Image (cartoon, rainbow, N blue to C red):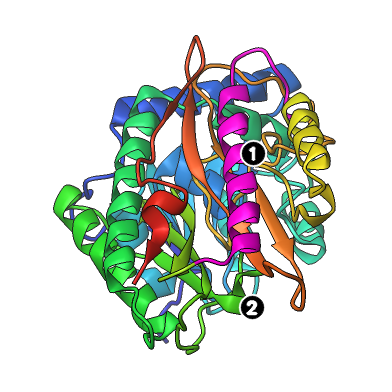
């Protein structure tokens, strides 16, 4: 009978060109290992897409199977499913161990093969579900466990020069998608048609700039009329009409790194009340960009923008926080929750952070000016202030189109 192993190495092909250099990944792992030493952790078992991509360059597709990156003092090993064959080996920094489907929980047997039993295990409490947490205990029998999620998020908040260079290119690609969408807007066009044009323009440009990359997950949310009321509303088949409020949202994804451009537009004309609301939101956006400076806190910026909207009589129409961090994240993985412009976040803004300014007002259907108004730019925090990375113009002068 043919032996069917629980795990094996499948180093099929040569290592691919990763998003960053070996030196960059070693620097990230060195900081993680320093944290591990501080908390007495002998092995880190990272399971989230964002942390595995950050420390190893590999962005997995789970499809019902778990994945991990195991980091010890000497090793960095991605744990992947057999269905992916050699792709995880080619696309990761470090080693790779493949587990088979032939026996339930071979994933944990593969992790145990690297960590051994009775160790101090670091894990991500905000990602590992209850069932998998129980299996960690059963298979690894740790001396104790340590939640590494806050520390890894704190590391990801401060971008390296290589990350900033990638984010800068992503912002430029987002602008290209924005201009393509603007050119495609016309009365009678469907939301989905306009969105596809913007997405295709961005994917083509990403392939031009990064010819050795994997291409996945770039998308557009292009909303009109009532569909603009939420920031994350899916695209529909609705046809644009004269006077419609529009929301343009381009999201180029480059090796797991998220960038975004978001703008309010109108088809051909804008009524007086809509123009007033739009201009008020643009004013909040401009104020917010001036407030993003080293030394202030997320909560302090939020308080000042709340005060502005309250003076305008519009605070009750604010939808969500005023901005968030950028890096390895997507609409279905990742979130650097420690850097969000909200009342309950006291994080101090420091140079090297990358954060959005994106005030949004939503007025319900039936009210004058009904719809969702949002401007969004990406800003790099510098020693003296910030640098705006997205360049597509905002406001009525450029965005009454069609």
Q: Quadrant of the N terminus?
A: bottom left
The quadrant of the image that shows the C terminus is bottom left
Quarter where residue 115 is shown:
top right
Location of residue 42 in the rendering, given as x and y in whole percent from the top left corner = 66, 30
Q: Which residues are magenta?
A: 270-298
Q: Residue furthest front?
A: 272
- Quick check: 49 above or below 356? below
- The mark nearer the N terminus, 1 or 2, is 2
Q: Main secondary structure of the magenta part?
A: helix
The residue under the point 72% across, 69% down is 368
Q: Position of residue 262 (x, y in %)?
A: 48, 54
Q: Nearer the viewer, residue 195 or 335?
A: 195
Residue at figure coordinates x 64%, y 22% from the top left: 35
Q: Is residue 307 magenta?
A: no
In this view, 167 is above or below 300:
below
User: Could you tell me if residue 228 is visible in this image?
Assistant: yes
Could you tell whether 387 is left or right of 197 in the image?
right
Viewer-side residue, 336 vs 274: 274
Q: Which mark is residue 226?
A: 2
Residue 192: % across, % down: 41, 82
Closer to the camera in the image, 9 or 61: 61
Q: Nearer the viewer, residue 316 or 138?
A: 316
Classify residue 370 by image quadrant: bottom right
What residue lies at 77% left-to-right and 39% top-to-bottom? 342
Q: Position of residue 379 (x, y in %)?
A: 48, 32
The secondary element bearing badge 1 is classed as: helix
Can residue 218 be seen?
Answer: no
Residue 278 within the segment the image draws in magenta: yes
Residue 284 badge: 1
Disc 2 crowd, CA 10 A, few/some/many (<14, 14-19, 20+): some
Q: Which mark is residue 10?
A: none
């Amino acid at each position: 009978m043919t032996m069917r192993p629980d795990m094996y190495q499948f180093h099929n092909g040569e290592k691919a060109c990763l998003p960053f250099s070996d030196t960059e990944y070693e620097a990230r792992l060195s900081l993680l290992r320093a944290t591990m030493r501080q908390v007495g952790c002998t092995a880190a078992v990272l399971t989230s897409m964002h942390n595995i991509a950050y420390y190893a360059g590999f962005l997995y597709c789970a499809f019902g199977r778990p994945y991990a990156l195991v980091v010890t003092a000497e090793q960095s090993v991605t744990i992947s499913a057999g269905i992916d064959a050699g792709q995880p080996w080619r696309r990761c920094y470090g080693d790779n161990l493949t587990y088979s489907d032939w026996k339930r929980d071979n994933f944990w047997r593969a992790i145990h093969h690297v960590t051994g039993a009775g160790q101090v295990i670091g894990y991500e409490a905000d990602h590992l579900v209850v069932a998998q947490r129980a299996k960690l205990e059963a298979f690894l029998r740790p001396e104790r466990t340590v939640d590494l999620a806050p520390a890894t998020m704190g590391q990801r908040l401060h971008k390296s020069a290589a990350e900033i260079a990638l984010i800068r290119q992503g912002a430029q690609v987002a602008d290209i998608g924005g201009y393509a969408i603007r050119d495609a807007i016309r009365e009678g066009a469907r939301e989905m048609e306009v969105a596809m044009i913007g997405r295709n323009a961005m994917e083509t440009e990403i392939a031009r700039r990064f010819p050795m990359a994997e291409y996945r997950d770039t998308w557009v949310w292009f909303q009109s009329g009532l569909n603009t009321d939420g920031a994350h509303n899916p695209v529909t088949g609705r046809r644009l009409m004269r006077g419609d409020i529009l929301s343009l949202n381009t999201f180029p994804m480059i090796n797991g790194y998220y960038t975004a451009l978001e703008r309010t537009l109108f088809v051909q004309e804008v009524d007086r009340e809509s123009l007033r609301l739009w201009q008020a939101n643009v004013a909040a956006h401009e104020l917010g960009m001036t407030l993003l400076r080293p030394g202030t806190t997320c909560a302090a910026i939020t308080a000042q923008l709340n005060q502005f909207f309250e003076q305008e009589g519009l605070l009750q129409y604010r939808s969500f926080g005023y901005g968030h961090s950028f890096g390895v994240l997507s609409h279905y993985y990742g979130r650097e929750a420690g850097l969000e412009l909200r009342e309950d976040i006291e994080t101090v803004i420091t140079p090297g952070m990358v954060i959005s300014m994106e005030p949004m007002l939503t007025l319900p259907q039936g009210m004058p000016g009904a719809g969702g108004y949002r401007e969004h730019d990406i800003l790099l925090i510098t020693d003296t202030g910030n640098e705006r990375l997205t360049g597509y113009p905002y406001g009525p002068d450029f965005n009454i189109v069609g």
